[in-house]
Amino acid sequence: MSLGGNIGRTSISHRFRVEERFISNPNEFIVRLRYLISLRIPFNKAGEKERLYGILKNEIRMNASKEETFDSNRLTAGIGIKTGKNSAIEVAFINQLETGSTSNYAYIGYRNNFDWRKNKNK
């Protein structure tokens, strides 16, 4: 389930997810709960065409079927550059905290949003 809205020109979204997972063998079944809060902050002035935007995300993942409930927390900070009406290139830094360890990643990705509506004027 996803919920979204705006605070001024900054868009905010919340995503709740339940994962049913089989880890390393078919007999080990895990349920993981995930919550993501995401901010997209435009860098343009009001009224200007958006080209650059900032990305801030925090996702916490919890085990619902294990004694140790904390799985991991993932913090993301980055920048996006719009390349078209529905596409962008994003570069981000990800810090993932797990029980007993921390990992850092760099991310470069291409984002494209498809409009599947038959009549796009609605």
Image (tube, rainbow, N blue to C red):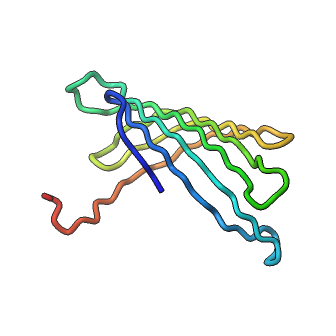
On the picture, is 55 further left or further right than 20?
A: left
Name the side, left or right, on which 46 lies relative to 62: left
Please say if 6 is above or below 69: above
Determine the image quadrant of residue 76. Answer: top right
Q: Is residue 100 left or right of residue 7?
A: right
Residue 80, image x and y in percent?
Answer: 43, 37
Residue at the spot 75% in from the left edge and 65% down from the top edge: 30
Q: In the image, 19: left or right of 5?
A: right
For this rendering, which residue is in front, 101 or 16? 16
Residue 9 pos. (x, y %) = 32, 29
Q: Note whether 2 is above or below 21 in the view shown.
A: above
Residue occupying the point 81% across, 71% down: 28
Nearer to us in this view, 46 or 30: 30
Quadrant in the rendering for residue 17: bottom right
* Position of 7 relative to 17 (above/below): above
Number of on-image labels:
0
Residue positioned most to the left = 121
**Residue 65 vs residue 54, the one in the foreground:** 65
Residue farthest toward the top in the current orientation of the protein: 45
- The percent coordinates of residue 73 (x first, y second) are 69, 41
The image position of residue 60, as x and y in percent, is 65, 44
Seen at 68% across and 36% down, the residue is: 95
User: Which residue is at a point 35% across and 40% down the rendered structure image?
Assistant: 82
